[in-house]
Amino acid sequence: MIDEARAEIQAAEDARALQDVRVRWLGKKGRITLELKGLATLDPDARREAGREINVVKQQVEALVEARKEELARLELARALAAERVDVTLPAAQGSSGGVHLLTKVTNRLLDVFASLGYEVVTGPELETDHYNFEALNFPPEHPARDEQDTFWTEDGRLLRTHTSPMQVRYMETHEPPFKVVVPGKVFRNEAVDATHEAQFHQLEALVVGERITMADLRGAIQEMADALFGEGTRTRLQPSFFPFVEPGAEFAIWWTHPKTGREEWLELGGCGMVHPNVFKAAGYENVTGFAFGFGIERLAMVPYGVPDIRWFYQSDLRVLRQFRGAL
Ligand code: PHE
């Protein structure tokens, strides 16, 4: 009988099953209880003998149940611990961390270059007045040069600035020469959007004003920027051009090796020139000269990093953005 009980007890897989076994053997109608009750039919000698035996079995069953109970509790604890086990040798969970946008990296790089050349960095409003964006920069009303810089107007007659040049006049109104400043910022044009034209993009403007600033200083500044960005001795080029707020005016380019094609070519960057006397007049300056240049930052990111479509900069597509994590 004890072997049978032991087998059932061992087979109980959890506390509930064990309790069932216990009731089956030791409960009110359990096998042991019934055996004890059956003693009543025996004569006194046989009853004593059988009673002792049954009681021994009863105690054994009780002890086996108790032992199995403790064993199940230990197993349960071990299972729980195993389920909560932490492997401290696994690599840490990779949270997705953000990064600096390629345009921001290129802008920061440019600002570093100019800061090292002694330029102050200033910024201005994106929502401008006609006065600062055009008039004070020597674009009279109806001037054809305005056509190239169509933009978005608000109902009160203001506009989203078409270039960073308005900051030239704003800065001069509140500062005295001599100075060197650069102005990074967002600009807007009413463009038919395509791979190389966006309605918003970024420019960097430079303005240097002093008593005897010359075209040679302008050339030197562009040369220093080229040297810093592309290496000492990089060739630069100025070609005559027209902007109402400079005289003479030019477009400038940097000779470089295209990283994809391996070809050497001119990278056309932007416009430059000597500050027009009318601009100094609008700013209230006399007896100074100066130069300015400005260029698009997207171009300086697209061409060197092989970004074929300007719209990709603004789509926040992680597949694009992640490619430049290691850049600069
Ligand atoms: N503001 C001009 C443009 O956006 C560029 C420029 C800046 C030209 C400074 C001359 C001097 O086209």
Image: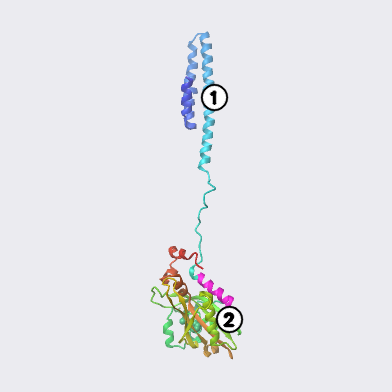
Colour scheme employed for the rendering of this structure = rainbow
Q: Is residue 147 left or right of residue 111?
A: left
Residue at 43% from the left image edge and 63% from the top image edge: 319
Q: Is residue 111 visible?
A: yes
Residue 238 drawn above or below residue 313: below
Q: Where is residue 133 in the image (x, y as percent from the top left)?
A: 49, 82
Q: Does the magenta stretch include residue 68?
A: no
Q: Does the magenta stretch include residue 107?
A: yes
Name the amino acid type tagged 1: Ala
Residue 34 drawn above or below residue 124: above
Question: Mark 2, residues whose alpha carbon is within 10 Å: few (<14), some, or many (≥20)?
Answer: many
Q: Can you tell which mark lies on residue 180?
A: 2
Q: Which of marks 1 and 2 is nearer the N terminus?
A: 1
Question: Mark 1, residues whose alpha carbon is within 10 Å: few (<14), some, or many (≥20)?
Answer: few
Residue 317 drawn above or below residue 239: above
Q: Label 1's element? A: helix
Residue at 53% from the left image edge and 18% from the top image edge: 56
Q: Can you tell which mark lies on residue 51?
A: none
Ligand 1 lies under 8 Å from the Cβ of mark 1:
no
| Magenta segment main secondary structure | helix
Q: Distance between the residues labelled 1 and 2?
A: 95 Å
Q: Where is residue 318 in the image (x, y as percent from the top left)?
A: 44, 63
Residue at 46% from the left image edge and 74% from the top image edge: 298
Q: Mark 1 points at which residue?
A: 63
Range of residues picked out in magenta: 104-121
Q: Position of residue 69 (x, y in %)?
A: 52, 30
In front: label 1 or label 2: 2
Name the amino acid type tagged 2: Lys
Residue at 53% from the left image edge and 37% from the top image edge: 78
